[in-house]
Image (cartoon, rainbow, N blue to C red):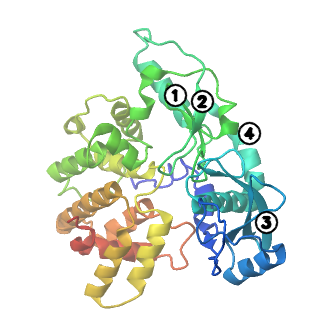
C-alpha cells in the first residue's frame, strides 16, 4: 500500500506564517543633516523637527517599509514615528522609557518595533477575516494540547494523577523561534509577545484562543518536553541533544534492517502503531524500535515526525534562497557552493538534522538495486516534507530536483 502523504499535511496551519514572511521589511531613512539636541536613544533615523510633507517625501523615495523619526513640538515626552505602508504614510506617537514603544509592546531596538508593526499591518490587511474566525472554527478537543493530555490520562488511568486539573496561568510570552497555537494550530505572528503561555504546563496560544481554553492545566503531563510537533531548536535544547532522538533512532533502525526492503519510504506502515510510538516518545517512555516487526512503520514514523514539525526543516525563506542559488548557475561546483551559502541561514539544529537525513537517504539509495529506491524516488517522496515552498511551485518538479541535488552532493550540508 502506498503512503498517504496528505494525512498530516495540514496539522499546523501555515497561512499566517507565509504572510509574515511576505510582509514588507523595515527600511531606515537616514538623516544626512546634523541634528542638534538629538535624543540619545535615536541614531540616523532621527530627522529633527521636519514637516510632515518633507517626511512623507523622504519615505516615498525609499519605498514600502521605509521609516524615520521626527521631533514633536506638541509632545515633550514623545517623538513621531513615520512609516510607509501600503502606499500611505502612517504617523505614531513614539515613546521611550529604556525601551521604544507606541502601544503595549516594548522593544529595545526601534527597527524591531517597525518590523513587528509592518507584520501586524500586513496580516491585518490580508487575513483580518481569517483571524476573526480561526478561534471560532477550532475544535478544542482536537487541539494539540487536548489530544496530548487525553492520551496521557489514558496511559495513567489505573493510577490517579499526582496533580489535579486546574486553570491555566497565562502570561504574555515572547517566542524566540517560530511557534504555533496549541488551541487553533495557527501561527503566532509577530516578533515579540506573539501570544501567551501557561506558566505551569507550557500551553501556548493566541490571546483570543487562550480565553477559550478550559481548566485542564496538567503540569505533570510534561507537555513542554514532548518530542513530536515541537520546534527543533527548542526540543534539542530541552533534551540536551544535537539531533532529535526520533530522527536518530528511526535512521539507525532503518539502516540496520531496512536497506534491502523493497519500497522503503514508499510503502506505508501501520498508522495506529505509528501513533502509539509517537505517544510513547512524547511521554518520555523508552522506545524500542527493534521490537517493531514492520520496518515500514519505522520509516513512516520518521516521515510523520518531519510532517508534524511546526516549521518545516527548510523554512520558506531559506527554501527560496537555496532554490535561487541552485538556479543561478549550471556549474556543479559553483552551484554547490552557492547552495551551501544559502543553507547557512538555517539554525544549527536544522542544518545538523538535514545533514543526518540526507546522509541517510544516500545510504538508502546506494542499495537501490535491492530496495528500488533511487535518489530521484527518495527526493520525490521527501521534498514536500523537507521544504516549505509556500505555494505550489511554478515548476512542479523544482523542489524534487533541488533535493536530489542535495542528496548527491554531501558537502553542501557538511558541518565544519
Report the residue marked by disc 4. Answer: 136
Which mark is first along the chain, 4 or 1?
A: 4
Residue sitting at x 35%, y 45%: 301
Q: In the image, is 338 to the left or to the right of 72?
A: left
Q: Is residue 34 above or below residue 252?
A: below
Foreground label between 1 and 4:
1
Q: Nearer the viewer, residue 34 or 171?
A: 34
Report the residue marked by disc 3. Answer: 90
Q: CA distance from mark 1 to mark 2?
A: 6 Å
Which mark is first along the chain, 4 or 2?
A: 4
Q: Residues within 10 Å of mark 2 (few under 14, many from 20)?
A: many
Residue sitting at x 71%, y 52%: 102
The quadrant in which residue 62 appears is bottom right
Indicate the secondary structure of the residue bearing disc 3.
strand
Q: CA distance from mark 2 to mark 3?
A: 33 Å
- Place of residue 192 in the rendered image (x, y in percent of width and height, measured from the top left): 57, 49
Q: Nearer the viewer, residue 210 or 151?
A: 210
Q: CA distance from mark 1 to mark 4?
A: 25 Å
The quadrant in which residue 27 appears is bottom right
Label 1 close to label 2 by CB (< 8 Å): yes
Residue sitting at x 31%, y 74%: 340
Q: In the image, is 243 to the left or to the right of 121?
A: left
Q: Residues within 10 Å of mark 4 (few under 14, many from 20)?
A: few
Q: In the image, is 319 to the left or to the right of 185?
A: left
Report the residue marked by disc 1. Answer: 199
Residue 266 visible (yes or no): no
Q: In the image, is 16 to the left or to the right of 236?
A: right
Which mark is first along the chain, 2 or 1?
A: 2
Q: CA distance from mark 3 to mark 1?
A: 37 Å
Q: Which mark is residue 170?
A: 2
Foreground label between 3 and 4:
3
- Place of residue 383 in the rendered image (x, y in percent of width and height, measured from the top left): 40, 66
Amino acid at each position: 500500500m502506498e503512503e498517504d502523504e496528505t494525512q498530516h499535511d495540514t496539522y499546523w496551519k501555515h497561512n499566517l506564517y507565509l504572510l509574515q514572511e511576505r510582509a514588507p521589511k523595515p527600511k531606515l531613512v537616514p538623516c544626512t543633516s546634523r541634528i542638534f539636541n538629538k535624543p540619545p536613544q535615536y541614531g540616523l533615523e532621527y530627522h529633527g523637527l521636519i514637516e510632515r510633507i518633507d517626511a512623507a517625501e523622504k519615505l516615498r523615495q525609499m519605498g514600502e517599509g521605509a521609516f524615520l523619526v521626527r521631533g514633536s513640538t506638541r509632545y515633550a515626552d514623545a517623538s513621531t514615528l513615520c512609516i510607509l505602508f501600503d502606499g500611505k504614510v502612517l504617523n505614531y506617537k513614539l515613546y521611550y522609557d529604556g525601551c521604544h514603544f507606541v502601544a503595549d509592546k516594548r522593544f529595545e531596538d526601534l527597527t524591531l518595533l517597525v518590523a513587528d508593526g509592518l507584520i501586524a499591518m500586513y496580516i491585518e490587511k490580508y487575513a483580518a477575516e481569517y483571524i476573526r474566525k480561526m478561534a471560532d472554527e477550532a475544535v478544542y478537543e482536537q487541539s494539540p494540547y487536548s489530544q496530548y493530555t487525553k492520551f496521557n490520562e489514558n496511559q495513567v488511568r489505573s493510577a490517579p494523577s499526582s496533580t489535579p486539573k486546574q486553570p491555566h496561568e497565562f502570561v504574555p510570552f515572547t517566542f524566540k523561534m517560530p511557534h504555533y497555537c496549541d488551541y487553533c494550530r495557527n501561527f503566532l505572528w509577530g516578533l515579540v509577545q506573539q501570544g501567551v503561555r501557561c506558566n505551569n504546563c507550557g500551553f501556548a496560544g493566541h490571546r483570543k484562543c487562550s480565553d477559550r481554553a478550559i481548566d485542564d492545566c496538567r503540569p505533570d503531563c510534561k507537555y513542554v518536553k514532548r518530542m513530536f510537533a515541537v520546534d527543533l531548536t527548542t526540543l534539542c535544547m530541552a533534551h540536551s541533544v544535537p539531533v532529535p532522538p526520533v530522527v536518530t533512532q528511526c535512521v539507525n533502525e532503518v539502516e540496520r534492517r531496512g536497506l534491502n526492503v523493497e519500497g522503503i519510504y514508499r510503502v506505508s506502515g501501520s498508522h495506529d502503531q505509528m501513533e502509539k510510538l509517537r505517544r510513547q516518545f512524547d511521554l518520555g517512555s523508552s522506545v524500542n524500535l527493534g521490537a517493531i516487526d514492520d520496518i515500514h512503520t519505522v520509516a513512516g514514523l520518521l516521515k510523520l515526525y518531519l510532517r508534524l514539525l511546526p516549521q518545516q526543516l527548510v523554512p520558506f525563506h531559506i527554501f527560496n534562497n537555496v532554490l535561487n542559488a541552485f538556479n543561478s548557475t549550471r556549474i556543479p561546483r559553483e552551484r554547490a557552493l552557492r547552495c551551501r551559502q544559502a543553507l547557512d541561514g538555517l539554525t544549527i539544529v536544522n542544518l545538523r538534522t538535514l545533514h543526518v537525513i540526507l546522509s541517510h537517504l544516500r545510504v538508502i539509495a546506494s542499495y537501490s538495486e535491492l530496495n528500488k529506491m533511487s535518489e530521484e524516488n527518495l527526493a520525490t517522496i521527501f521534498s514536500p516534507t523537507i521544504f516549505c515552498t509556500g505555494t505550489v511551485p511554478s515548476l512542479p518538479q523544482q523542489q524534487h530536483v533541488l533535493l536530489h541535488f542535495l542528496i548527491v552532493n554531501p558537502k553542501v550540508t557538511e558541518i565544519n
